[in-house]
Amino acid sequence: MLLKLIVFILLIAMLASLFTGFWFLVKDKGNERKRVLYALFIRISLATALVGTIAYGIGTGQLGSQAPWDRELHPERIIDE
């Protein structure tokens, strides 16, 4: 449950960084500040952390797929809750 919460928080933070970067892009027309680049760097860092967290969760078995097409292809991977 904690891993799912971390993934959710990283996703929300990434979306916030996306909209912040858009706001800086619109607001700072012709300005010398590099706030858009900093927002991009933060978003790339958050995306890397998100992918790493998901890979860790799948690798340890804490995260899995419950999609209907996955049940048909891999019946041995069905998670019973």
Image (cartoon, grey):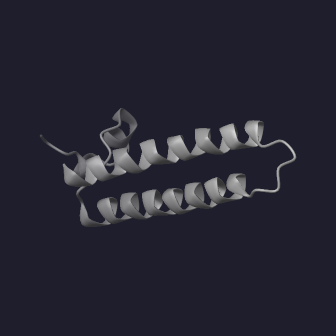
Q: Is residue 43 above or below residue 27?
A: below
Whole-percent x and y of residue 62? 23, 57
Q: Residue furthest right?
A: 30
Whole-percent x and y of residue 14? 51, 47
Can you tell which quarter of the image residue 58 is in?
A: bottom left
Can you tell which quarter of the image residue 29 is in?
A: top right
Residue 48 in view in this figure: yes
Question: Residue at (24%, 60%) from the top-left corner?
Answer: 61
Q: Is residue 39 above or below residue 18?
A: below
Q: Residue furthest top?
A: 68
Question: Residue at (87%, 46%) from the top-left corner?
Answer: 30
Residue 63 in view in this figure: no
Question: The C terminus appears in which quarter of the rendering?
Answer: top left
Whole-percent x and y of residue 7? 35, 50
Considering depth in this image, is 61 or 48 the residue closer to the camera? Answer: 48
Q: Is residue 75 left or right of residue 20?
A: left
Whole-percent x and y of residue 52? 43, 64
